[in-house]
Image (cartoon, helix red, strand yellow):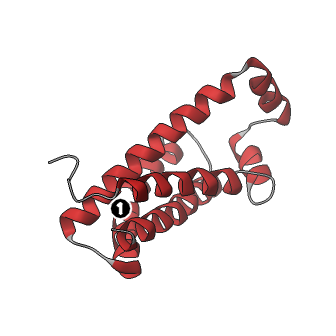
Amino acid sequence: MLFGTNINYLAVLVAAIAAIVIGSLWYSPILFGNIWMKLSGITKEKMEKDKKKGGMTKLYVVQIVASLVMACVLANLIALLGLTGVVGGIQIAFLVWVGFVLPLLIGNVLWEGKSWALYLLNITYNLVNLIVMGIILAVWR
């Protein structure tokens, strides 16, 4: 069953919101936004231009939906495996990160010519994000 009946959908929503907050902070000037922009080749002028065109709203909506999907799938994995507690949340987060995120994002370096520094920044964000989501979903069952 794709969407289990023993899923706490409020926890899924909270985990998705947490992912948006983490991403907003991680890629903001407060934390690593300036480094990310430099490594990605994105200028402040381009960001301002995109904001003025209204394209940012669409991007945020897509990211919110993606975060909800990710939280729902992670909640289903946690339920299927019977994981609970902080340790269970961290374990599944780490396995998903190693098994899916690392291999998928390495293509950005190998085939798109992105830097290893950008890869490291992005995979670290994904690890933090998955750990927080995993903990929320495994504790709040």
On screen, residue 134 above or below 122: below
Q: State left or right for residue 54 relative to residue 30.
A: left
x 47%, y 68%: residue: 131
Q: Label 1: which residue? A: 96
The kind of residue tagged 1 is Val
Expressed as whole percent of the image width and height from the top left, the position of residue 86 reads 41, 79
On screen, residue 120 above or below 3: below
x 47%, y 49%: residue: 105
**Mark 1 falls on what kind of element?**
helix
Nearer to us in this view, 106 or 131: 131
Q: State left or right for residue 42 relative to residue 128.
A: right
Nearer to us in this view, 66 or 4: 4
On screen, residue 64 above or below 118: above
Within 10 Å of disc 1 (Cα), the crowding (few <14, some 14-19, many 20+) is some
Q: Quadrant of the C terminus?
A: bottom left
Q: Residue furthest right?
A: 45
Expressed as whole percent of the image width and height from the top left, the position of residue 73 reads 31, 51
Nearer to us in this view, 110 or 38: 38
Expressed as whole percent of the image width and height from the top left, the position of residue 69 reads 38, 44
Q: State left or right for residue 66 relative to residue 56.
A: left
